Image (cartoon, helix red, strand yellow):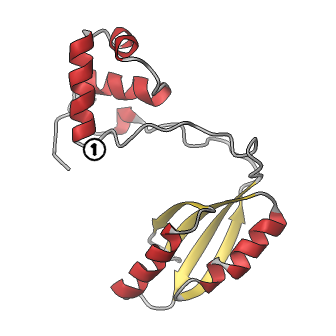
Amino acid sequence: MPDIDIDAGDLRILSALQTDARLTVQELADSVAMSTSAAWRRVKRLEQAAIIKGYNAALDRRALGLGVLAFIRVTIDSHSRDEARRFEEQVLDLDAVTACWSIAGEADFLLQVVASDLDSYADFAMNVVRRLPGIKEMHTMFALKEVKPLSGLPLQLSGSSAT
């Protein structure tokens, strides 16, 4: 990934796109007080630098029938690179796992999982996750309420030269 300097104009563009990625280039330019061509060039530069990785629609999991949101802390048997890689490769193929992080602390991985209901979650946890390679322990935590779901990154904390 190219190392580029992010300035105040770039941050305004990123903020506007995090709020509404469907803005036309003209609407974006107007909202960040730039010419259309300048805004377009900056967006292309940010895309090429992989700072903008793509554009997504924010979906309501409950409206889609995914009422359960769970987090599974997983500890693997061995801390070898190969064992961790095998686990990671298997997790990539699991649609119910919406995010996975390698973590420090008491566990090795944290999985974010969605399911339609508790029975579906239990089936997934016991018949899929527990059978992944190298699992030593797993602990589930259920989200009771989404207080602050991910809605974008705090650009003011980005450490760029513009902040």
User: Residue at the spot x=22%, y=14% of the render?
Assistant: 37
User: Residue 94: horizontal and vertical position, in percent?
Assistant: 57, 68
**In front: 10, or 159?**
10
Q: Look at the image and tell me in which quarter the C terminus lies.
A: top left
Count of number-bearing discs = 1
User: Residue 2: horizontal and vertical position, in percent?
Assistant: 16, 46
Q: Label 1 is placed on what type of residue?
A: Ala
User: Residue 136: horizontal and vertical position, in percent?
Assistant: 58, 88
Res 54 → quadrant:
top left
Q: Is residue 90 above or below residue 134?
A: above
Q: Can residue 8 be seen in this view?
A: no
**Left or right for 71, reference 89:** right
User: Residue at the spot x=70%, y=75% of the render?
Assistant: 125
Res 157 → quadrant:
top left
Q: In this view, does 35 lie above or below 3?
A: above
**Left or right for 60, reference 21:** right
Q: In this view, does 81 lie above or below 23?
A: below
User: Residue 92: horizontal and vertical position, in percent?
Assistant: 49, 68
Q: Can residue 114 be seen in this view?
A: yes
**Left or right for 118, reference 23:** right
**Mark 1: which secondary structure?**
loop
User: Residue at the spot x=49%, y=38% of the render?
Assistant: 56
Q: How crowded is mark 1: few (under 14 residues within 10 Å), some or many (20 or more)?
A: few
Q: Name the residue under label 1.
A: 50
Res 79 → quadrant:
bottom left
User: Residue at the spot x=41%, y=27% of the render?
Assistant: 17
**In front: 119, or 74?**
119
Q: Is residue 72 above or below residue 40?
A: below
